[in-house]
Amino acid sequence: MAKKKTNPAGSKAESGLICDDVLNAKLGVLTRREVEARILIPIIDALGESFGRDEVLAVVRETIIQIAREQGTELSRQMGGNSLKHFVDSLDYWTRDNALEIDVIEESDEVLSFNVTRCRYAELYESLGIREIGIVFSCTRDFALIDGFNPDISLQRTQTIMEGAEFCDFRYRCRKPETS
């Protein structure tokens, strides 16, 4: 009998991502990120002492990116579609409890542009003394999340409050199908 090969992070069950993840709907993303940070920081610190902080943060970053991509796919399923309108409707999860203050610049079927003028995620990570890791825990997710939600929607962002800017500039755009 052949031995079954497994990929350590190959399936959702193996990677720790629970199918039908409804925590964002139950808790809001801000509370979820605080719980995650309070659990992960001591673990990251301990692993960093043993294996090197930069190496550990690189693994954490890549893992979070993969989880965010999977969560984007799951989010599109939960929202009943993967259009930009469906994504706009999902923003309630991230803005719950006034977690983000957003100024919408443009919203259409093809474009969503907004600036985040207050970010309680940045404030949370700052209060925990881990702002630089907050970038990994929250900001790094954005590009992978939208890629998982719909790979035909692009995100451009040039600055974040977490990195010291006055606002975060989110620019989502539906990619035009290539014509031959």
Image (spheres, grey):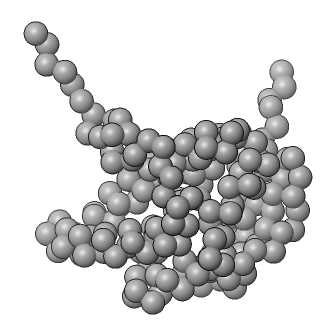
Which of the pair 43/39 is nearer the observer? 39
Left-right relation of 84 to 19: right
Left-right relation of 151 to 13: right
What residue do we see at 75% from left, 74% from top?
A: 102
Name the quadrant containing residue 130. Answer: bottom left
**Residue 77 vertical placement versus 41 (above, below):** above
Inspect this view and state whether residue 126 appears: yes
What residue do we see at 66% from left, 70% from top?
A: 95
**Residue 149 vertical placement versus 60 (above, below):** above
Q: Quadrant of the N terminus?
A: top left
Which of the pair 87/131 is nearer the observer? 87
Which of the pair 42/167 is nearer the observer? 42
**Residue 81 vertical placement versus 164 (above, below):** above
The number of callouts visible is: 0
Left-right relation of 49 to 61: left
Q: In which quarter of the image is the C terminus?
A: top right
Left-right relation of 141 to 4: right
What residue do we see at 81% from left, 57% from top?
A: 112
Picture coordinates of residue 23 (x, y %)? 48, 58
Picture coordinates of residue 160 (x, y %)? 63, 75
**Residue 137 vertical placement versus 8 (above, below):** below
Inspect this view and state whether residue 138 appears: no
Name the quadrant containing residue 177. Answer: top right
What residue do we see at 61% from left, 43% from top?
A: 78
Picture coordinates of residue 170 (x, y %)? 72, 65
